[in-house]
Amino acid sequence: MLLTQLLSNRHSATAATAGDDKLRSLDSSSPSSSSTPHCTMGSNLPYAADAESPLKPAELQVLRSQYEKEGDYVGIQTKFNYAWGLIKSNARPDQQEGVRLLSEIFRAAPERRRECLYYLALGNYKLGNYGEARRYNDLLREKEPGNLQAASLGQLIDEKVSKEGLVGIAIVGGLALAAGVVGGLVMRGAKRR
């Protein structure tokens, strides 16, 4: 309910994105609900672009306060909501903490693994850990081949890997050229002696 309220407040303050609307289902618990709600994969996940718009500091603080308030008895949904907010952050330490929390949920709550896969992929993507991002995203796509969000994230990962691969090739090529020039100058200097 906390995330729903947070997103409702955010929605009324600014125009909501499609991802924000989809995230409303992340915390659909009601006082009468006795079990932790589960987000269903597929249409309820935001596209990767939504993760690029961080929560306002006050919004993230609401999630952090709830997480800290629950202390040693923090609920899975509270931890998940906080991890989601951290992954949306532009601060690398927040993103790392979000991935760490999601990894804990992934290991401790087998029934929540499918939910965590996308956000682990997304968090690792934002951190530049493209191999890990691809691994989690591929696991999700194996379970849900029609998941459009995972397909979209997969394309983003592939584009980054290709781009960084080309940059890497250019760097290696530049280093090889520089080494050749230095080697040529050294050889030329040795012949003069």
Image (cartoon, helix red, strand yellow):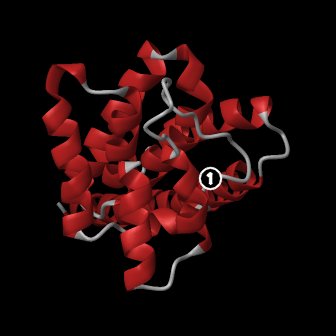
Outermost residue toward the front in this view: 32
Percent coordinates x, y for residue 110 in the rendering: 55, 15
**How dense is the environment of label 1, judged by Cα within 10 Å: few (below 14), some, or many (20 and up)?**
many
Residue at label 1? 45
Percent coordinates x, y for residue 96 in the rendering: 29, 43
Q: Relative to 57, is 172 on the left or the right?
A: right
Q: Quadrant of residue 160?
A: bottom right
Residue at 14%, 36% in the rendered image: 69
What is the total number of numbered labels drawn onto the structure image?
A: 1
Report the front residue among 64 and 104: 64
* Amino acid under disc 1: Leu
Asked whether residue 97 is in view, the answer is yes
Which quarter of the figure is the C terminus placed in?
A: bottom left
Q: Would you place residue 123 above or below residue 6 in this image?
A: above
Q: Would you place residue 33 above or below residue 23 in this image?
A: above
Asked whether residue 175 is in view, the answer is no
Q: Relative to 65, is 115 on the left or the right?
A: right
Outermost residue toward the right in this view: 146
Secondary structure state at the residue bearing disc 1: loop
Percent coordinates x, y for residue 162 in the rendering: 62, 58
Residue at 36%, 23% in the rendered image: 104
Percent coordinates x, y for residue 63 in the rendering: 26, 50
Report the front residue among 192 and 25: 25
Q: Relative to 14, is 97 on the left or the right?
A: left
Q: Quadrant of residue 190?
A: bottom left
Report the front residue among 52 and 156: 52
